[in-house]
Amino acid sequence: MEFTVPKSFDEIKEGVIAPEGVYKFIVTKIQSLPNKAGTGTNVVIDLTVTGDSEDYNGITQSIYLPLPNPTDEGKKTRQGQLMIDWKLQNIKETVEALGGTIDGSSFNIPEDCMCKAQLAIRMNDDGKKFNQIEGRIMSYSPGEKELS
């Protein structure tokens, strides 16, 4: 059986891999989704590179913030921190970097906020390169003076 596609297979363009470095991102979507195990919820923050270079603008990354859930009770990280506290610390640092607010046990992340993040280059099992955020995101405000 024959199929026709909208362009020639000779015209396929590979995705862009940004060189390792710090890039500016804008938050393009924030959503609450069930985790893979079905035991809890992740706040998923989609980020898009913006303003750094026409070549790399539009590269997207996602940050997953697992919310504490009943299966965390009594569990600890390898460093001995309670899992619930580790998750809350991760949320707090991310929310603060995005200019959000924390009030008691609730938090808010503003839409269209910006941040900076270190992009690294990784390789999957098939030997294909991809970008991944390395470490924590950093706060950024448009017009902020760039360090040289």
Image (cartoon, rainbow, N blue to C red):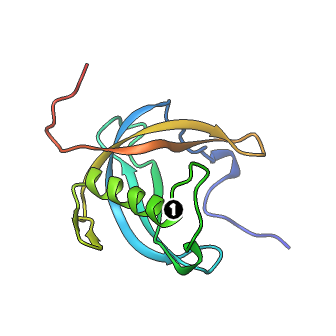
Q: Is 50 drawn above or below residue 95 in the view shown? A: above
Query: Residue 136: which quarter of the image?
Result: top left
Left or right, residue 30 beside residue 124: left
In x, y percent, where is residue 129?
65, 39
Identity of the residue drawn at 58% across and 36% down = 121
Quadrant where the image shows the C terminus: top left
**What's under tag 1, amino acid-wise?**
Leu
* Residue 145 visible in this rendered orientation of the protein: yes
* Residue 64 visible in this rendered orientation of the protein: no
For mark 1, give the secondary structure.
Answer: loop
Q: Is 17 drawn above or below residue 48 in the view shown? A: above
In x, y percent, where is residue 19?
50, 30
Q: Residue furthest top?
A: 148
Identity of the residue drawn at 59% across and 44% down = 13
**Nearer-the-camera pick, 55 or 103:** 103
Left or right, residue 98 beside residue 44: left
Identity of the residue drawn at 60% across and 80% down = 39
Q: Is 110 drawn above or below residue 140 in the view shown? A: below
**Nearer-the-camera pick, 3 or 132:** 132
Identity of the residue drawn at 51% across and 55% down = 81
In x, y percent, where is residue 47?
39, 55
In x, y percent, where is residue 51?
29, 40
Judge the density around disc 1: few (<14), some (14-19), many (≥20) Cα neighbours within 10 Å. some
Left or right, residue 141 beside residue 87: left
Q: Residue furthest right?
A: 1
Q: Which residue is mark 1?
A: 82
Q: How many marks?
A: 1
**Nearer-the-camera pick, 36 or 15:** 36
